Amino acid sequence: MDKDKQIEELKAEIEKLRTLTNKDELTGILNRRGFKDGVRQFISEVSNSEDYSERRKSMVIKNFSLVIFDIDDFKKINDTYGHQVGDRLLQFLSKLILNRAREIDLVARWGGEEIIVGLPGADIEDAFNFAEDIRKSLGSSVVEDVKFTISGGVAGFYEAADFEGLFKNADTALYEAKNSGKNLVFKYKK
């Protein structure tokens, strides 16, 4: 086997391994690791946009928002209909979000029934509108004879100093939505 072919095979194998370590097996979207790797670049760009405002003005990303979705009463759904139905709901929701997301957006399964979406360039109003669109679209869907709802929390980068703060703010908004009756999307408020 010649060296060029070996190199190409090794590159393909590396890409396959990278995909395996960054994708959620069930849904096909990013996993937590893949999301964090991707979001790091965008957070850095937003953080530096003020410092380097002259650098390729048309390419600077000045906003970044985060949405956390959570399937309402997921444990009850799994207990009532089985984990396979729960898995199909996650797959359906993931596809719905991916179909509405832009190519630059980051969509990941964060854990259990939570799906997180990073929206580069989106302010908190853009992110809220995106999340509401997903929530309303889901309202008319039935999967495996199960009608289900989601709640969402939205936060913008400028209310936080780093990704951990941004996540905490979106998570706070999500729990406000859950505690206010579910099937709602809330924006983080200081």
Image (tube, rainbow, N blue to C red):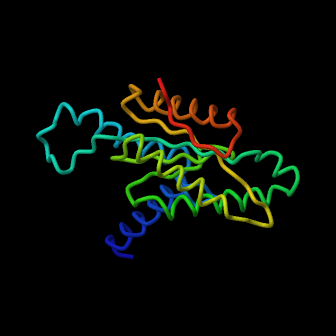
The residue at the far right in this view is: 80
In the image, farthest residue toward the left:
54
75 vs 165, left or right, is: right
Residue at 54% over, 46% down: 116
> Could you tell me which residue is drawn at 59 percent across and 60 percent down?
137
Q: Quadrant of the N terminus?
A: bottom left
| Residue 142 spot, x, y in % from top left | 73, 65
From the viewer's perspective, tell me whether residue 12 is left or right of residue 95: left
- Residue 114 appears in which quarter of the rendering? top right
Q: Quadrant of residue 88?
A: bottom right
The residue nearer to you, when weighing 65 against 109, is 65
Name above or below for residue 140 compared with residue 52. Answer: below
Residue most toward the top? 190
Residue at 58% in and 29% down: 172
Tell me what residue is drawn at x 37 percent, y 46 percent: 122
Residue in front for this viewpoint, 111 or 22 = 111
In this rendering, would 84 be left or right of 189? right
User: Does residue 9 appear left or right of residue 88 in this picture?
Assistant: left
